[in-house]
Amino acid sequence: MKHESQRQHVVDLCLELSRRGYFAGTGGNIMLRIDAHLVAVTPSAIDYQVMKPEDVSVLHLSDLRQVDGACAPSVEASLHAGVLRERPEMGCSIHTHQPVASALALLGEEIVVPPRWQATLGPCLPVVGYAPSGSGWLARKFSRKVRGDVNAYLMHNHGILCCGRDSAAAMQAVDDLEALARALLNQRIDQRVTGAPADLEHALQRTRDALNDRPIS
Ligand SMILES: [Zn+2]
């Protein structure tokens, strides 16, 4: 099998993202740069637990023509390709519906990134407006938002996309984005709690417990 190590790496990354709770079912996908022309992409609609390296699609980055792989590529391949074409220094792009950052994406607000997260994420989190998954419309909207200094994007009413120079950097961005989203949502709850009536305070406390993975009281 050609490009076996990169295709195995895509499978391993999917399993790790599932283990960390960022990928669920078949939701979420990855593009990994193989060389200047080729990329490896998760196949469409295959459970990560049974995915094999030969299922991983190999595509030309320029036109997404498939050159290898037993399955059709992810419908979001064009989304990742837009990022990797604009950012030739990036080696890996990850799209997830990870729970907390996707909740932040529901707000539809561009976020200024605090200094401690800027090295991995960049100075801000742009919002890409909603369009149906896998559509050319979404890919075009996304590519217009890609910036040379931004490694994390909020996709309104959908999820997120992070990129990095290699898979470790992209994974770190996914982790950091989830931590930043949790901190920001906690901050919003704190602001609401101040001066809130007792029943609202209790409801906010339950939301905070869910957000921080504590048992609901
Ligand atoms: Zn998605």
Image (cartoon, grey):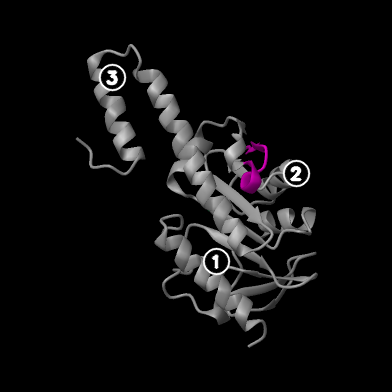
Snapshot quadrant of residue 90:
bottom right
Estimate the x, y position of residue 8 in percent, counting from the top left. 56, 78
- As helix, strand or loop, the secondary structure at mark 3 comes to helix
Mark 3 or mark 2: which comes first in sequence? 2
Q: Do residues under tags 3 and 1 come within 8 Å of each other at their CB atoms?
A: no
Magenta span contains residue 165: no
Q: Is residue 76 visible?
A: no
For the N terminus, give its image quadrant: bottom right
Q: Nearer the viewer, mark 3 or mark 1?
A: 3
Quick one: label 1, few (<14), some, or many (20+) residues within 10 Å?
many
Estimate the x, y position of residue 130 in percent, counting from the top left. 60, 39
- Measure how far apart labels 2 and 1 are at the Cα level: 27 Å
Amino acid at dot 1: Ser
To which residue does mark 2 refer?
A: 147
Q: Relative to residue 44, is residue 85 depicted above or below?
A: above
To which residue does mark 3 refer?
A: 200
Amino acid at dot 3: Leu
- As helix, strand or loop, the secondary structure at mark 2 comes to loop
Estimate the x, y position of residue 152 in percent, counting from the top left. 62, 46
- Name which residue lies at 41% across and 72% down: 49
User: 104 and 90: which one is in front?
Assistant: 90
To which residue does mark 1 refer?
A: 44
Q: From the viewer's perspective, is 47 left or right of 80? A: left
Quick one: label 3, few (<14), some, or many (20+) residues within 10 Å?
few
User: 135 and 9: which one is in front?
Assistant: 9
Q: From the viewer's perspective, is 200 left or right of 162? A: left
Magenta span contains residue 127: yes
Magenta-drawn segment: 118-129
